[in-house]
């Protein structure tokens, strides 16, 4: 699991912080009414998990109320009854700052919540990810296509049932969906579809698991020509998820967390391991469950933005 370098500590912990640095993320609470936030001269207002508050300001916790916050990649538990001055709280956290592998995990949560607070933030975050993609970051190519697909529909697949989706302008003439083995020229599957989705069980294709396969969609134009998407490589390996779970159960950082944080850590590590299809399924299940929290929904929206799935992300915040 430890395939990442340790996240380095900030070089100037005593420097004056920007407003962005002074954001406190409310990760979890045990109450919907016992925690309030206020700034000088303003009224107190209730805060909930998934919200961000900033210094200067105060958090008030009534008797029995608890909250978990993330500030500068550090997780801190608060208990009531107490009144916390956020400037002082931030200074205390900075003085105890230590660089750990888990700090990257808390940063991941913090950034996800910041990126998805409002529809406007979602749009801004998507533009930032696109800018990074065009700069060659996060594994995206620089070439643009009129037909595009989410990033989680390429790479290593661990579940055989896949709904391939793509984004494009409307093409009333329909689409041609094709799958073929890398290094060959004849498709193992070719289908004409009318919508921007096609569901397939990979076990039915009898693909050679030792080499990647490719999928591509083409849109039929009015003049009978075809507008093609990029070729998206994928490989089906159900055993990869089993190996991932075994490694996770031996991960000391994972074992050090409480159950709610473990569930998020699993999502984080699925993405870090490049198991994007499995991550998408796990994020979606958590965000749409009967007891889903706002944080889980925001994490899913943030994941979709990183996967270049803006429409799907926007649907999550409606």
Image: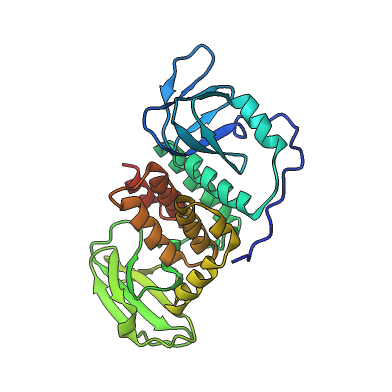
> Residue at coordinates 40% horizontally, 27% vertically from top-left?
34
Q: What's the coloring here?
A: rainbow
Instruction: Give the side of residue 204 with respect to residue 267, left or right.
Output: left
- Give whichever of 194, 269 is nearer the camera: 269
255 up-or-down from 214: above or below: above
Image quadrant holding the C terminus, namely: top left
**Placement of 26 over or under 285, stated as above or below:** above
Rendered location of residue 147, percent (x, y)? 39, 62
Residue drawn at the location 44% of the way across and 15% of the way down? 43
Q: Position of residue 184 (x, y in %)?
A: 44, 88
Is residue 146 visible to us here? Answer: no
Q: Nearer the viewer, residue 271 or 307?
A: 271
Task: Establish if 178 lies above or below 131.
Answer: below
**Front position in the image: 199 or 78:** 78
* Residue 109 percent location from the top left of the image: 52, 47
Question: In screen coordinates, is 209 left or right of 251?
Answer: left
Q: Residue at x 36, y 56 (%)?
A: 284
Is residue 169 visible in the rendered image? The answer is yes
């Amino acid at each position: 699991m430890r395939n990442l370098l340790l996240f380095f500590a900030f070089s100037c912990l005593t420097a004056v912080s920007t407003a962005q640095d002074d954001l406190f993320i409310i990760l979890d609470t045990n109450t919907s009414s016992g925690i309030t936030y206020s700034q000088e001269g303003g009224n107190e207002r209730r805060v909930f998990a998934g919200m961000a508050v900033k210094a200067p300001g105060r958090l008030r916790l009534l008797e029995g109320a608890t909250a978990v916050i993330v500030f500068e990649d550090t997780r801190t538990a608060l208990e009531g009854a107490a009144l916390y001055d956020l400037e002082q709280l931030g200074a205390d956290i900075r003085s105890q700052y230590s660089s750990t592998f888990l700090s990257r995990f808390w940063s991941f949560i913090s950034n996800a919540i910041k990126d998805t607070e409002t529809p406007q933030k979602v749009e801004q975050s998507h533009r930032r990810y696109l800018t990074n993609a065009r700069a060659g970051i996060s594994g995206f190519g620089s070439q643009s296509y009129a037909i595009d697909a989410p990033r989680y529909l390429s790479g290593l697949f661990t579940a055989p049932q896949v709904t391939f989706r793509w984004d494009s302008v409307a093409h009333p003439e329909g689409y041609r969906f094709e799958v073929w083995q890398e290094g060959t020229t004849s498709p193992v599957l070719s289908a004409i579809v009318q919508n921007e989705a096609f569901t397939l069980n990979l076990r039915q294709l009898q693909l050679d698991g030792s080499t990647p396969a490719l999928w591509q969609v083409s849109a039929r134009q009015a003049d009978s020509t075809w507008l093609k998407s990029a070729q998206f490589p994928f490989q089906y390996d159900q055993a990869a998820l089993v190996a991932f779970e075994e490694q996770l159960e031996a991960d000391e950082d994972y074992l050090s967390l409480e159950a709610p944080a473990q569930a998020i850590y699993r999502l984080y590590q699925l993405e870090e391991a490049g198991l994007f299809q499995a991550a998408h399924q796990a994020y979606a299940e958590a965000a749409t469950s009967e007891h889903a929290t706002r944080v889980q929904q925001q994490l899913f929206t943030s994941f979709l933005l990183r996967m270049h799935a803006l429409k799907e992300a926007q649907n999550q915040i409606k």
